[in-house]
Image (cartoon, rainbow, N blue to C red):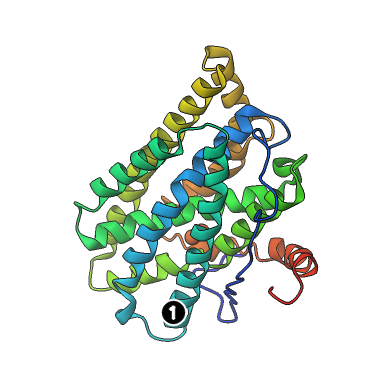
Amino acid sequence: MTANRKTPNELAITPRDLTFGEGAAHERHWLAGDPVATAFYNALSATFPLGERFFMDSVRRYGHLAGPPLDGQIAAFLAQEAVHSREHLLFNSQVAGHGYDVAAMEARTRARIAFVKTRPPIAQLAATVALEHFTAILAHAVLADPRHFEGVAPEARALWRWHAMEEIEHKSVAFDTFCAASRDMPAIRRWALRTTAMAFATVLLFSNVFASMGSMFRTDGIDRIATWGRVMGFLFGRPGILRQALPSYLGYYAPGFHPWMNDDRALIVDLERTLAAAQPGVA
Ligand SMILES: [Fe+2]
Ligand SMILES: [Fe+2]
C-alpha cells in the first residue's frame, strides 16, 4: 500500500464504451450456479442505474469548482458512469426476465435516494463519496481474488470486471470534488460530514441489498434460515468479499483518509489487455 494522500498526477481515467450480453442472456444463477452469490450481485446491479445517476448529479453540481486536472477527471467519471448504467440496465432486464421482481428492487433504491435528496447538496455529495468508496473497495476485492467470478460465463465476467476496473480508476473523483466543495469548512466538520454520511450509506445500502436478496430467495423458494447462513458464509467466509473489504472500509473513518492511499492500479493492467483483446477497436 502506497501512502498517497492525493490523487496521482498521472492518473488515467479512460471511458471505455463497451457492451456486454446483447447476444446472449445470462443464466438464472449465472454466478457458478449459486443462487446466493447470484442474488448478491443481482441486488447490487439493481441499485446501479439509479444510484449512478444520483452520483453523477451530486458531482456535476459542484463541477464548476474544479480546476485541472479534476475538471477532466469529472468529465471522464461522468462518461464512465453513464455507460455503466446503460450496461447494467441491460443486465437487470435479463434478471427480470428470470422472474425476479427488479421493479420492486428499483423502487426501494428510488425511495432511499429520495430520502438522501432531502439533505443539503453537500451532504448528498458526501453520500456519493461514501458509496463511491464502497464500490471501489468491492471492486478491489473482486479483481484481487479470482475466486469471486470463478465459473462465470465470459460475457458476464467481463461486464463485472470492466465495471470494477473503472470504479478503481475514478475512485477519487467524488472525494476530490467534495474536498473542493467543502474547502471553507473546518477540517473536523468536513470529517464529521464524510463519516456520518458513510454510516448512513452503509445502513441504506445493505438494508437495500438484503431486502432485494430476500425477494429473489422468495422467488426461488429458498427464503429460509439456512440460505441466510450461506449468505453470511459467502460474504464473510469464502470467498468473503465483505471480510476482504473490511479494513479498507474502516480506513475511511480515519481523519487523513484519501482513496489513493491504496494505489491499486496494478489490478487494472492485465484486465485492460484482456478486454482490449476481447473487443478490439473499442477499448
Ligand atoms: Fe459505476
Ligand atoms: Fe463509480
275 vs 221, nearest the viewer: 221
> Which kind of residue does numbered mark 1 sit on?
Leu
Q: Position of residue 59 (x, y in %)?
A: 35, 68
Q: Position of residue 165 (x, y in %)?
A: 63, 61
Residue 146 position (above or below residue 191): above
Residue 104 seen by the camera = yes
Numbered circles on residues, count: 1
118 vs 26, nearest the viewer: 26
Residue 255 seen by the camera = no
Tell me the SS state at disc 1. Answer: helix
Indicate if the residue with disc 1 has its beta carbon within 8 Å of ligand 2.
no
Q: Which residue is depicted at the point 43% across and 86% down?
A: 68
Q: Is residue 70 left or right of residue 261?
A: left
Picture quarter with the C terminus: bottom right
Q: Position of residue 273 (x, y in %)?
A: 78, 68
Q: Which residue is depicted at the point 41% across and 38% down?
A: 105
Picture quarter with the N terminus: bottom right
Residue carrying label 1: 70
Q: Is residue 247 left or right of residue 200?
A: right
Farthest residue to the top: give it.
Answer: 225
261 vs 267, nearest the viewer: 267
Q: Which residue is depicted at the point 59% across and 58% down?
A: 163
**Quarter where residue 106 is shown:** top left
**Quarter where residue 267 is shown:** bottom right
